[in-house]
Image: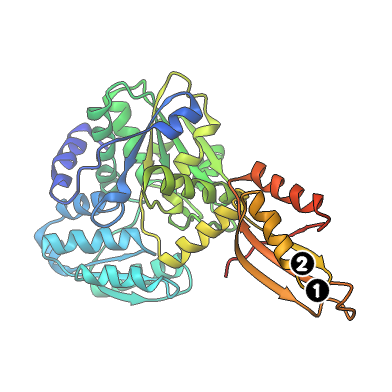
Amino acid sequence: MLTLEKFEQAAELVKEVTLPTKLVYSEYFSRQTGGKIYLKPENMQYTGAYKVRGAYYKISTMSKEERGKGLVTASAGNHAQGVAYAAQKFGCKATIVMPTITPLIKVNRTKSYGAEVILYGDVYDDACAYAMELAKKEGRTFIHPFNDLDIATGQGTIAMEIVQELPTVDYILVPVGGGGLITGIAVFAKMLNPKIQVIGVEPASAASMTAAMASGEPVELASADTIADGTAVKCVGDKVFPYANENIDKMLMVEDDELIGVFLDMVENHKMIVENSGLLTVAALKQLDLKGKKAVAVLSGGNMDVITMSSIVQHGLIQRDRIFSVSVLLPDKPGELVRVAATIADAQGNVIKLEHNQFVSTNRNAAVELRITMEAFGTEHKEEILQALEDQGFRPREIGAKLY
């Protein structure tokens, strides 16, 4: 059972392994929505995500004998680090099974907390099946990432911190994958104040909680293909679902493309790195009428490798017309490149890449191609640059931008 006594016990316990993640008021998102928007930055936890809460509380409920046998779990990232760190604090052995495609940085971070890492399978489901088999074979204790009421209790401690800091909160938005986080937050929040609206947010292409609530029971999706990998779960947990179904007020869905621009918003306006799953709540703010309301968006984690980060930034700049590329055809004679550059400079554009193709036509005197990638302030400015080139007779043709 999820009880108030257990939540209060967990809230005290997790203080031993969590950093204070005080609410951050967002002037930027408040201005956009007309409400008062606060961020709960769990991306700032020592392990980079909220997962250590549930792992630590779960291990605290085990007997010394259970801990002594060793722990086994499966994860592609955040849960792995949470269990490894919590196990280290309790002085017990942990084995984490991770998919073979897990970025090296996440593998090394998990190992740095003293855990043994086994790479198995191409996806989380393969790794999880192997981990469960390993636990059974070796008599160890398996810790599920989300389908466990003790795990949910630990995650729910976030609700107490929010309510203590902002007693008059109207909405709490929570990312949803397997359902452990929102189950804990929703149940505990309702115990503290039944008027609080708890809103779950899922990737549109991995909306397993939405499907479960529509069916009245967990259902398995055909796929869960999303850049929000921390919430890419085909089926929510059957143990947590009844509690989630009863206490979630509304489910929202967000397309992957929306997360890309929000990543830029967080970096530029709050100087924070938030992984795609953690951005779901911020991306969903515009779907609610928040005028005159106080809302907290839970940022569940910030574990993103730099290669993914650079790709997201590039796509975000292109998506918002702050980087774009054009092709122009020029006669192959001196001075033409200078004319193009001067036109762009006069329109306050900034050239960041040039490609000169003399072989676009067999008649070089008639035309050579110049591909220009440049920066702009946004869509309106981009249109001004294109118009300036048009006015000078260059007839620019927009092409797919690529920085690398």
Residue at the image position 19 percent from the left and 68 percent from the top: 70
Mark 1 belongs to which amino acid? Lys
Foreground of the two, 132 or 96: 96
Q: Is residue 235 above or below residue 92?
A: above
Tell me: 377 left or right of 270: right
Foreground of the two, 147 or 34: 34
Looking at the picture, how far across and down is residue 318, in whole percent? 61, 55
Tell me: 281 left or right of 86: right
Residue at the image position 25 percent from the left and 42 percent from the top: 21
Mark 2 belongs to which amino acid? Glu
**Residue picked out by circle 2:** 336
**Residue picked out by circle 1:** 333
The disc placed on residue 50 is none
The C terminus is located in which quarter? bottom right
Farthest-out residue, front: 335
Tell me: 51 left or right of 249: left
Foreground of the two, 56 or 213: 56
Q: Residues within 10 Å of mark 2 (few under 14, many from 20)?
A: few
Q: Are marks 1 and 2 in contact (CB under 8 Å)?
A: yes
Location of residue 87 by image quarter: bottom left
Where disc 2 sits, the SS reads: helix
Looking at the picture, how far across and down is residue 242, in whole percent? 41, 38
Looking at the picture, how far across and down is residue 331, in whole percent? 84, 70
Location of residue 355 by image quarter: bottom right
Tell me: 98 left or right of 53: right
Residue at the image position 55 percent from the left and 53 percent from the top: 316
How far apart, in angstroms, are the residues tagged by discs 1 and 2? 6 Å
Where disc 1 sits, the SS reads: loop
Looking at the picture, how far across and down is residue 22, in whole percent? 25, 38
User: Which color mode does the image show?
Assistant: rainbow
Residue at the image position 30 percent from the left and 22 percent from the top: 193
Q: Residues within 10 Å of mark 1 (few under 14, many from 20)?
A: few
